[in-house]
Image (cartoon, helix red, strand yellow):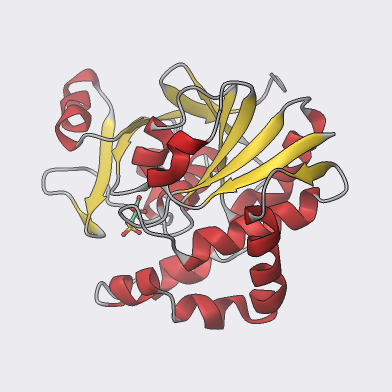
C-alpha cells in the first residue's frame, strides 16, 4: 500500500527520501493559499524563489514580482502575499515570480520529489483526489515558520491525512499526530487558528480577511504542480 508521511518543518526535510514520492507543500498563511487562488483565477504561472534578489531580477523579464518579508510586501514589488491580490484583474494572464519567508523555501527544498504539488485548504479535496490517482507514496511538507512547527500547516496535514486514510498507510507517527489534532480542532478551526502564532504575527498588519479566506475549504478545484521551474495548473493529469 502507498504511504503518507508528514514533515512538520523545512529543517527536517533532509530526513525524508523524496526521490520516489509526491510532495504536497503547504503554507496556509499565506504562500500556498496565494498560489492556489492565483492559479485558479487565471494567473498563467507562478515561479517560486527562495532568494529575494533573484526574484527581483524577474521584473526585467516581464514577470509581475510578488513577495513578503515579515508578512509585509517587499519594497518595489508589484504584489505582496495576499490571496485577494492574486485574484485581482491585473494579475490574470500574467506570469508571477514570488518569494516568501517560508513557503518558497519549502518548495525549493522539495526539488528531488517525483512531483511537487501545492496544497491549501482552498483546494484540499482536489489534492486528495490527485494523490489517490497516483501510484507514488506522498509526503505533506509543512512550511512552518523559520524552521519551527506551526498550527495551521499541521492542521491542514491532519485534514489531508484524514481524506487519504483509506488509500494510504501511515509512514510514521507524524500522520497520526496531525490527524488527532485535526479531529480535535476542526469544529472550531477559525477559533484555534486565531490563537496561532502566525495569525497573531499577522494581526498587526490587519489582514483578517486574508486569514478568513485561507481557512475556506474547497473553494477551488485546481491542483498546482511544479513543471520545470514554474507552478502551473495541472491539466494533463501528468
Ligand atoms: O512565510 C511565508 O511563506 C508567508 O506565507 C508568510 S506571510 O503570511 O506572508 O507572513
Q: How far across and down, in percent of the image, does residue 65 sit?
A: 25, 36
Visible in this render: residue 219? no
Q: Is residue 163 left or right of residue 127?
A: right
Q: How far across and down, in percent of the image, does residue 13 sit?
A: 46, 39
User: Where on the picture, by quarter, is residue 97?
Assistant: top left
Q: Which residue shows up at 31% across the image and 70% down it?
A: 202
For the N terminus, which image quadrant?
top right
Q: Is residue 87 left or right of residue 216?
A: left
Q: State the residue in front, 58 or 143.
A: 143
User: Where on the picture, by quarter, is residue 108?
Assistant: top left
- Report the residue that reaches farthest toward the right: 166
Ligand 1 falls in which quarter?
Answer: bottom left
| Callout count | 0
Q: State the residue in front, 194 or 123.
A: 194
Q: Is residue 236 left or right of residue 225?
A: right
Q: Which residue shows up at 41% across the image and 55% down it?
A: 144
Q: Which residue shows up at 42% across the image and 66% down it?
A: 210
Q: State the residue in front, 73 or 22.
A: 22
For the C terminus, which image quadrant?
top right
Q: Is residue 137 left or right of residue 18?
A: right
Q: Which residue shows up at 47% across the image and 47% down it?
A: 32
- Report the residue that reaches farthest toward the left: 75
Q: How far across and down, in percent of the image, does residue 200 sit?
A: 34, 77
Visible in this render: residue 150? yes
Q: How far across and down, in percent of the image, does residue 47 sit?
A: 37, 28
Amino acid at each position: 500500500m502507498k504511504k503518507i508521511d508528514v514533515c512538520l518543518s523545512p529543517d527536517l526535510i533532509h530526513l525524508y527520501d523524496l526521490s520516489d514520492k509526491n510532495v504536497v507543500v503547504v503554507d496556509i498563511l499565506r504562500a500556498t493559499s496565494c498560489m492556489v487562488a492565483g492559479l485558479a483565477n487565471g494567473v498563467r504561472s507562478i515561479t517560486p524563489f527562495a532568494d529575494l534578489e533573484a526574484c527581483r531580477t524577474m521584473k526585467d523579464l516581464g514577470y509581475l514580482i510578488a513577495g513578503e518579508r515579515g508578512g509585509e510586501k517587499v519594497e518595489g514589488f508589484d504584489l505582496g502575499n495576499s490571496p485577494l491580490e492574486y485574484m485581482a484583474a491585473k494579475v490574470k494572464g500574467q506570469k508571477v515570480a514570488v518569494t516568501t519567508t517560508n513557503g518558497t523555501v519549502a518548495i525549493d527544498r522539495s526539488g528531488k520529489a517525483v512531483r511537487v504539488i501545492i496544497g491549501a485548504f482552498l483546494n484540499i479535496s482536489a489534492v486528495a483526489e490527485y494523490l489517490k490517482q497516483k501510484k507514488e507514496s506522498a509526503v505533506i511538507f509543512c512550511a512552518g515558520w523559520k524552521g519551527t512547527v506551526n498550527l495551521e500547516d499541521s492542521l491542514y496535514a491532519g485534514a489531508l491525512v484524514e481524506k487519504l486514510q483509506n488509500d494510504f498507510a501511515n509512514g510514521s507517527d507524524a500522520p497520526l499526530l496531525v490527524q488527532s489534532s485535526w479531529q480535535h480542532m476542526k469544529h472550531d478551526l477559525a477559533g484555534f487558528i486565531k490563537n496561532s502564532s502566525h495569525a497573531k504575527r499577522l494581526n498587526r498588519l490587519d489582514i483578517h480577511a486574508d486569514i478568513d479566506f485561507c481557512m475556506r475549504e474547497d473553494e477551488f478545484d485546481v491542483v498546482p504542480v511544479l513543471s520545470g521551474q514554474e507552478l502551473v495548473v495541472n491539466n494533463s493529469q501528468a
